[in-house]
Amino acid sequence: MQVESKLVEIPNNGNPTVEYIENELTKRNINPLRWAIVNVSDTIFTVSVANLMK
């Protein structure tokens, strides 16, 4: 397996729960090893993700 680091933009729903962020990552076919919100705007969360690739 390889790990790929990437930045992902997710719509800001005003309530950044773990479930919401992980569901949005899964919709984008990302298998997160770890993630962190690195920037917040009125409309977007920017999330740094370590994606496990097969």
Image (spheres, helix red, strand yellow):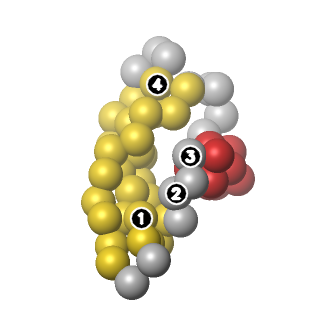
Residue neighbourhood size for the residue with mark 2, other residues' Cα within 10 Å, grouped as few (<14), some (14–19), many (≥20): some
Q: State how far apart marks 4 and 2 are (Cα).
A: 18 Å
- Which residue is identified by label 3? 28
Task: Say which amino acid is labelled 1.
Answer: Asn
Q: Nearer the viewer, mark 1 or mark 4?
A: 1
Instruction: Provide residue 15's location: percent of width, then percent of height.
Output: 65, 34
Q: Residue furthest bottom?
A: 1
Q: Earlier in the sequence, mark 1 or mark 4?
A: 4
Q: Earlier in the sequence, mark 4 or mark 2?
A: 2
Label 4: element kind: strand
Q: Nearer the viewer, mark 4 or mark 2?
A: 2
- Which residue is identified by label 2? 30
Residue neighbourhood size for the residue with mark 1, other residues' Cα within 10 Å, grouped as few (<14), some (14–19), many (≥20): some
Task: Say which amino acid is labelled 3.
Answer: Arg
User: Would you identify the image quadrant in which residue 36 lies?
Assistant: bottom left
What residue sits 52% from the left and 57% below the top?
A: 30
Q: Earlier in the sequence, mark 3 or mark 4?
A: 3
Label 1: element kind: strand
Label 3: element kind: loop
Question: The N terminus lies in which quarter of the figure?
Answer: bottom left
Instruction: Provide residue 4's location: percent of width, then percent of height.
Output: 31, 65
Instruction: Provide residue 40's location: percent of width, then percent of height.
Output: 40, 29
- Which residue is identified by label 4? 44
Instruction: Provide residue 25's location: percent of width, then percent of height.
Output: 56, 50
Task: Say which amino acid is labelled 2.
Answer: Ile
Tell me, yes or no, whether the two marked residues, 2 and 1, touch with CB atoms within 8 Å: yes
Q: Nearer the viewer, mark 3 or mark 4?
A: 3
Point out which mark residue 37 bears. none
Q: State how far apart marks 3 and 1 are (Cα).
A: 11 Å
Number of marks in the rendered image: 4
Using the image, determine if residue 19 lies above or below residue 50: above
Tell me, yes or no, whether the two marked residues, 4 and 2, touch with CB atoms within 8 Å: no
